[in-house]
Structure formats: C-alpha cells, structure tokens
Image (cartoon, grey):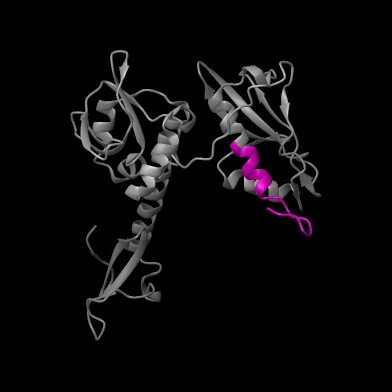
Amino acid sequence: MGWLAAGEGYEIALVDGKVAARAMSGRSSGRRLKTLPKALRDHPEVERLQRFADWLDRHAAACAAQVDAWMVSSLPVPVRLLGRVWADEAWRVALRDLVVVGAVGDDPDEPGFLRDVARTGELRVVNLDGETVRMSAETVTFPHPVHLPDLEELREFAAELGVTQKVEQVYRATWRKPAEAVPTATAVHEFSGGRYPSRFRITARVQSLGYRVSGCYAVCRVRDGDRMLDASLWIGDPYWDDESETGELTWQDAEGRAVRLSTVGPVAWSEGMRMAAALYAGRTLGEGEAA
C-alpha cells in the first residue's frame, strides 16, 4: 500500500499492520517517524486506515481458522477454490507450506509441501525427494498429522527446508490412543489437578488458546469421521471465583451423550488430549514442581 496524504506536511501508510507516518517537509522530510505525531492521532484518514488494519487482522484470523478447520477435519477441499483464494495474501499465508495430499480416483498422490496454486487449480508442491512437482486433482486434503504415515520424515524434511506453517500441522502436538483402552471407560484423568488461582485465570487461558468455555468445561469440537464430538475438560464451577483446577477429560456426541474411549477416533482423541495438556501446562506450579 502506498503513502496517503494526511493533514499538512504528513503522509501515512500501513507498515507491518500498523499506521505509520512520515513528514513531507523540514529536516525529517521523507523519513518514517518513530511515533505517530499528536496532530495526526485524531485525523479522519488515520482512523480510516486503522479500521482497515483491524479488518485485515480479522480477515487473516478468519482465513487461518478456516484452514485449521480443514486440516483438523481432513476434509476434501476443491482445488478450484484454492485457485481463487490464493491471490489473497491472508489465504496464501495460511495455506503455504501445509502438507497437502491430492487424489486421482481412488489413488492418493504422495504428500508434499504446498508452494503455489494456479488460478486453474493446479498445485505446485515440494515432495519428500526435494523435487517441485505439479499436482492435478479435483480435491485435496490437508491431513491432520495423526493421518500422516510419514510424519517424522516430514518433520525432518520441514526442518531442512526451514518451513514455517501459519496453521500448525507437521509440528502439531499429537497423542495416540492406547491400544488397551478399557471398553467401558469414558474419562481420562491424566491432566486432572492442574490448579489455577481463580476461575477467571483458567477461563482466560482457555479462550487465549482458542477453545470454548461451556459451563464447567473447556470444550474442543472436532469432526470424528462422520460425526462431531466435543472433547470437554472440567475447569470448575463458573460461579466459584476461588481457586479452580482441571478435572477429567471426556468426549460427548452431538446429543451430549458420553462416548466410550474405545470408540473415540484418532483425531478427536489427539485434539482433546492436546487441549487438556495445554491447560494443564498453564497451572500454578508448587514449590519444586517441574512444568
């Protein structure tokens, strides 16, 4: 974005998402100022540009959230849709370098890191051999890491390439469900007992991590194959503002019925455990207790 006239002797522009100014006269002519001059702080052009910056931030967050939802659910995404949104920087930043898998008929392509999308929908990806190849398919998926059989190899290759993903995928913390799950068990207690000084503090952490608070629980909604599940971690009574602590982790179906651990799918299991671990990690540590 170019520089815009704002008042006498100043121009403004968005620089790294913030409104910046430069003087157009005097000894500082043409140089960007370290702070916004007082004379500009209430200027209509500055307020307009700030509102635009706020919208760009919301748009970028919405794009990242949508891509994250595609990845967590491993949903098929039409490549023509990717071709249309790729020109938008916010979409491009959210999508670039994600591991993508295409399919022609029933034969899936090898996974690769997404680098470019043509408007027609043809993708350019870097495969595990380090070669840039073209991928043509009607739909692609951005698999959740528990569905990537070559995850460790992909992580090593991503480190070699210096890959940085806006939407966490290859380096996303994952948990595998124990094979010996008790058939009748409905709760995990591994992350119980994480104490917080108040209900407000634990609620703030839940929301900062992008999860939802519902009554006594932190909730993570996940598509589990053909069904939706809510992973719910007890965080204390909402009407009790004294010390709170994490409790049991459970999963419920769309009707709110408890789901046996033995029937929880790999993604729902991993995402529920990821939420619980992140909230337990934010607990108040006792003397001599390791994080």
Residue 61 in which image quadrant: top left
Decide: is 164 above or below 5.
above
Decide: is 15 above or below 58.
below
Q: How many marks?
A: 0
Residue at point 66%, 25% (across, down): 251
Decide: is 3 above or below 289.
below
Image quarter (top left, top right, bottom left or bottom right) of the N terminus: bottom left
Q: Nearer the viewer, residue 13 or 276?
A: 276
Residue at point 77%, 59% (across, down): 288
Residue at point 77%, 43% (across, down): 193
Q: Is residue 252 magenta?
A: no
Tell me residue 283's x, y (percent): 71, 50
Residue 270 showing in the rendered view:
yes
Q: Is residue 287 magenta?
A: yes
Residue 250 in which image quadrant: top right
Q: Nearer the viewer, residue 191 or 252?
A: 191
Tell me residue 125's x, y (percent): 26, 36
> Which residue is at the far bottom?
27
Residue 59 showing in the rendered view:
no
> Which residue is at the far top?
106
Asked if residue 217 lies left or right of residue 31, the reply is right
Q: Nearer the viewer, residue 146 or 72?
A: 146
What's drawn in magenta, residue-wise?
A: 274-291
Asked if residue 124 lies left or right of residue 240, the reply is left
Tell me residue 97's x, y (percent): 33, 41
Tell me residue 123's x, y (percent): 23, 32
Asked if residue 207 lies left or right of residue 93, the reply is right
Residue 239 in which image quadrant: top right
